Amino acid sequence: MNDSPPPRADARAPPSTCATISAPAPDLALILLKSVAEFPSKPFGAGGLQKTFSFIGDPVFALLAGMLLSLTLIRRREDVKEGFSTSSMVVSHANDSFFWVVSQFSDLEVNTAYKVYTSATAIEGGVAFAAAWVMSFFV
């Protein structure tokens, strides 16, 4: 007979629904602050506060900050590996419907789309894989 207590969920981690809903909130809040800071009426003035909000609200910075904050929501190292392995895209090619959406809406000839878009997504996939691999050593 096993007298050990039942396994407990990690008390520090939020429920998955809460984590999913709250993950993009910091990104959106920072981008919203930038939009407000750049109103013509200058609600934060024209000094350091306005420049700070404009910098941290830049989408690249805001999304990077949000991604780093979302790492606090991960419960275990296995969750990171599972997340990276299940949400990867390496190359978008002719058998991918998004390839056709991009090539048709951007008025690219198919031959050009093969060369340009497929190469760009291959580079993106390689960089994403390398970043995930490096992060797996720290998380």
Image (cartoon, rainbow, N blue to C red):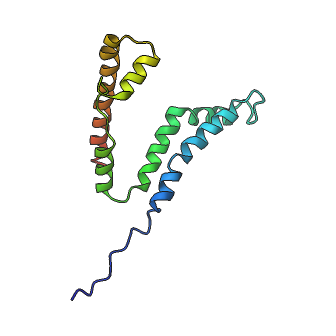
Q: Which residue appears at 75% of the width and 26% of the height?
A: 40
**In which image quadrant can residue 38 be found?**
top right
Left or right of residue 118, residue 102 in this image: right
86 to the left or right of 58 = left
Seen from the viewer's position, the closer of residues 101 and 60 is 101
Q: Is residue 66 left or right of residue 122?
A: right
Residue 136 shows up from this direction: yes
Residue 36: x %, y % from top left: 69, 35
Residue 48 lies, in percent from the top left, at: 67, 34
Q: Nearer the viewer, residue 34 or 45?
A: 34
Kindly identify the residue that appears in the image at 59 percent across and 37 percent down: 31
Instruction: Name above or below for residue 117 compared with residue 77.
Output: above
Q: Is residue 88 above or below residue 103?
A: below
Is the N terminus in the top left, top right, bottom left or bottom right quadrant? Answer: bottom left
Can residue 139 be spotted in the picture? no
- Viewer-closest of 59 and 51: 59
Residue 124 location, quadrant? top left
- Percent position (x, y) of residue 26? 55, 46
Residue reaching furthest to the right: 41
Left or right: residue 102 versus residue 126 is right
The residue at 31%/39% (across/down) is 88
Quadrant of residue 85 within the rendered picture: top left
Total numbered labels placed on residues in the image: 0
